[in-house]
Amino acid sequence: MRERPGAPLFQLGAGSYVLAPDGRMLLLDAERLGERYWSTPGGGIEAGETIEQCALRETLEETGLRVRLVRLLSISEFWRGDRMDGVGFLFLAEPDPWPQQPSPPARDGLSHFHGYGWFRREEIAGLRVPPDELYLRAWPTEILTPLMHRFEADD
């Protein structure tokens, strides 16, 4: 892969797993680049933002919810061959205040949102979700110390 002059070495991003007080997780019915999944909010860090500010902003932009970050759940590295392409930070978040009504926009960047839902752990098994989602292996409340992940691109 040929590098673009002035291109960043890698992307930085942050997102959240938003849990309601009853333990249900908020998922967005989102379509991006022709793929449609139930996903969680997140995106790229903007100039002047901290990692936490990015997670809060992305959650607000994509869900309409104000949240409080509880703790860091994971740090993920994204690789293409022998080149690290990005780093993502994932937080556990709670709506603050509660209750709030989610209101995802029709579009945000490359994503088109079709709706949302609050799901219990056992309900997620029947949904189309990205195969590498952390919550498929461990529910957010079970993760007490941050996990490290490495994801390889499929190209």
Image: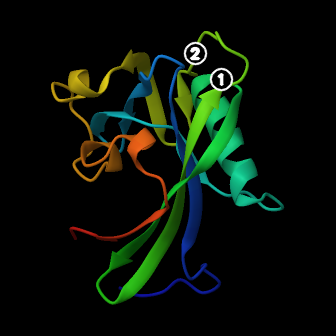
Q: Is residue 28 above or below residue 79?
A: above
Residue 123's place in the image compared with 11, above or below, is: above
- Place residue 149 in its image quadrant: bottom left
Contact between labelled residues 2 and 1, with CB atoms less than 8 Å apart = yes
In the picture provided, is 155 more to the left or to the right than 118?
Answer: left
At 44% from the left edge and 40% from the top edge, which residue is drawn? 141
At mark 2, the secondary structure is loop
Q: Amino acid at mark 2?
A: Pro
The label shown at residue 65 is: 1
Are there few (<14), some (14-19), or many (20+) residues within 10 Å of tag 1? many
State the residue in front, 122 or 117. 122
Quadrant occupied by the C terminus: bottom left
- Dividing the image into 4 quarters, which one contains the N terminus? bottom left
Q: Identify the residue at horizontal 69%, vertical 50% (top origin).
A: 54
Give the structural element (helix, strand or loop) at label 1: loop
Dot 2 corresponds to which residue? 102
Residue 45: image location, x then y, percent: 67, 58
Depth order, front residue of 142/149: 142
Q: Is residue 133 visible?
A: yes
- Place of residue 87 in the rendered image (x, y in percent of width and height, measured from the top left): 51, 69
